[in-house]
Image (tube, rainbow, N blue to C red):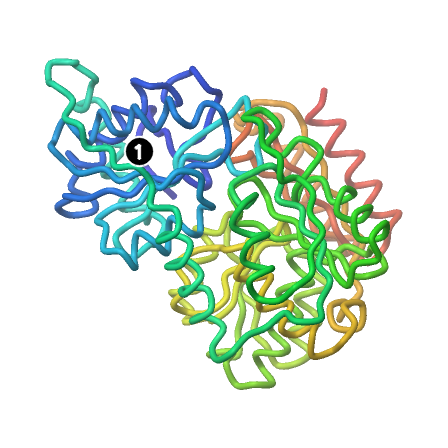
Amino acid sequence: MLSCGERNIFGTDGVRGKVGEWPISLAGCTQIARSIVLSEALGQISRVFIGKDTRASGGMLENGLIEGFSSFNIEVICGGVLPTPAVSFLTRDLGFDCGISITASHNLCRDNGVKIFTREGKKLSDEHIVKINACLEYAPTNNDYEQSSKKIEPAVEIYYQVYKKALLSELGGDFSLNGMYIALDCANGANFEIAPRLFKDLGAKIIVAGCSPDGKNINASFGATCPQTLIDLVLLNKADVGISFDGDGDRLIMCDETGRIIDGDAIVATLALNMLKDGTLNGRNVVLTTMSNLGAEVFLSERGIKVYRSDVGDRSVAQMMANKKSALGGEQSGHIIVGSQTPTGDGILSALHMLKIIKKASVASKACHLFNPYPQLLQNICADRSLLNEQHIKLELAKLVDQAESIGCRLLVRPSGTEPLIRLMVEGRNTNSVKRIMADVSNLLAG
């Protein structure tokens, strides 16, 4: 667990919050940038790369970061609208000391945030976070310096080619999508230009949705959190397969030609079985999270694949993958990390790995539904995380956990790391039991 004190600004994945409220403000981002430098958590920094999604507030936060880094005479290069995974690859492959993606991922436009990468393109470790957080109070925005002009306009074509090369190198050998008809939903987010171009460059015929960002419509009725849009797009256009990203492009949700959703658990199971067959599943293990369906774990275990479970978030998945020397990990929500050298979850890269399998199988529905998920219910309760610290709530939850286990169910209650929500998950072999436990715990927390 992190121990950052009362001013810990980091959640499950970076810093996130309401636009205009500290630290998601001009001054707050200046302070974050200065804290990164003062903490020396990432070593000496001379060059920083910044990308952002399509939110209207991105430019303001970008200016705050530029101001903070420029106060130390650090060069800042802004890549414009780029998916978070591209920022990760570009930071690593173009030799930057730090990379930052300005995004609130799957949240709506009222929120924004920053995700920070090391020079290796990796998410921050717990140690990095503690050091940066500890320097916040020593990094105020004083306006006692002159901002030097360090922003350099984006070299869009160069960034696209470097990212494309990185993606294809992860796939190995020649790769083509010739003959495939693919529906793409880009969530009006960071993938709205790169994804359609890349899939067309690789030979696919595509139909797109969620590719008209206006600064306010990111993730609104489009993207990985709104799969019905993708289902409708596939069925209406009779596409071979559907691919849906979230606002910053690090999540992937798919659907087959019949409109049946292929979630992160199904993606991991499909990739794991194929990697096992071709000898690339290092250690014969995968990393899932506490939210992953038990059906996936049973399916993989029956085939001799060890399953480890991490906390939620692709940062936690990546850390456990490194610890267990795993070549594959992912979340039910669609964060998938393929390959021991891949820095972070990448929707496009994961999609390309899946399309390689689907193309070989000819039909998506035959390739991607390898197990029957256990009955599982998910629910969000609008409440502050402090509710879970109340003594009578703790006692009642403990009783419900024991009750769930006694009838073969699994109950998970956790505060969201990105929103003022408490997330509930109940699963088991019997649907009625799952419904009963969910009703009991939601009634307890909803009051």
Three-letter code for the amino acid on which mark 1 is drawn: Cys
With 4 as the anchor, is 190 left or right in this view? Answer: right
Q: Image quarter for residue 106?
A: top right
**In which image quadrant can residue 401 be found?**
top right
* Residue at figure coordinates x 73%, y 46% from the top left: 426
User: Looking at the image, which is closer to me, 64 or 132?
Assistant: 64
Q: Is residue 24 above or below residue 207?
A: above
Looking at this view, is 333 or 438 the one in front?
333
Residue 365: x percent and y percent?
Answer: 80, 67
- Vertical side of 250 occupied by 342: above or below: below
Up-down relation of residue 123 to residue 71 (above or below): below
Q: Which sits in the foreground, 404 or 372?
A: 372
Which residue does the image show at 67% across and 51% down from the upper left?
184
Locate residue 367, reporting x and y percent. Answer: 74, 73
Quadrant including the N terminus: top left
Viewer-closest of 310 and 313:
313
